[in-house]
Amino acid sequence: IASIGMTFVILLGDIDLSTGTVISFVNILCAHMMVNMGMNPVIAVLISLVASTLIGVLNGFMVSTVGIPAIIATYATQTAFMGLALIMCGGMPISGFSKGFAMIGQGYVGVVPIPVIIMAICFAIGSFILNKTYFGRYFYAVGGNVEAARLSGILVNRIKYLVFAISGFFAGLAGIVMLSRTNSGMSNAGYGYEFKVITCVVLGGVSVTGGYGKISGVIAGTFIIGALQNGMVLMNINSYVQDIVMGVVLALAVGFDCIQKKKQSN
């Protein structure tokens, strides 16, 4: 789910390192509101999604209006909101949710898990945005050539705001699903997820320099990473070795993309 927002960001030639922290922050925020404040789960979820979207808007402001490079702006957001999440929970997990909330991450419709249905709907929405909306075309235009896009009348700054806001929203939604699935709000729930999400997107054929990629490729990349991780767990491979393998996969995917770009330029 989080990889959809990251796809849009990378299509622009930017990167969002705050994804994992947004997942963790939403875990803690939503859990805190439901358990410690006694808030209705629906309202808590909606407020959490608004908060995650606003974090994306903040990233867009720093990147677009202030001019901070995306890698620095989102790293700053990552660090700040991780600290805020830890302050809210005191470093301790929060649990004790209603059975109704648990349905989001643990329920089934027939034989199909609800998280899979949510993921499928999100990928369909992502594909619709890219292929059937005018601003989806703008994502490709800005990622391909920022200056040409600006001269053609595209409001580049607004597009960046929109993309980072969407990234924040999908990361927040992923955090809600994870919270419901684990039934416990943890400050490290999304630790390292930005790395996994970027790997899924790049492995799915989205160019790290922007301007090229499809949601269908990201879906394939997501399933490949999921199968690879599950396979390594089933084979009882050491977690440190798993990190090495994932790092190599990311390097190979980016390397292949760079080689393809060089061939095209020649």
Image (spheres, rainbow, N blue to C red):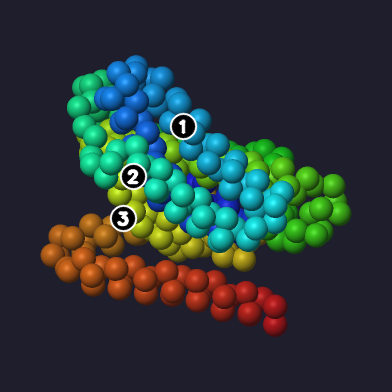
Q: Is residue 24 left or right of residue 107?
A: right
Above or below, 177 against 190 in this view is above
Which residue is identified by label 3? 226
**Which residue is pictured at 56% across the width and 60% down the height?**
72
**Vertical position of residue 74 compared to residue 51: above or below:** below
Q: Mark 1: which amino acid?
A: Leu
Which of the pair 186/224 is nearer the observer? 186
Label 2 Cα crowd, 10 Å radius (few <14 / some 14-19 / many 20+): some
How far, Cα to Cα, is label 2 from label 1? 19 Å
Q: Which residue is label 2 attached to?
A: 86
178 lies above or below 148: above
Mark 3 and mark 2 in contact? Answer it, CB < 8 Å.
Answer: no
Q: CA distance from mark 3 to mark 2?
A: 28 Å
User: What residue appears at the point 70 percent right and 56 percent down from the top-left corner?
Assistant: 67
Q: Return the disc, 3 or 1, that comes first in the chain's sequence.
A: 1
Q: Name the residue beneath numbered marker 1.
A: 49
Alpha carbon distance from label 3 to label 1: 25 Å
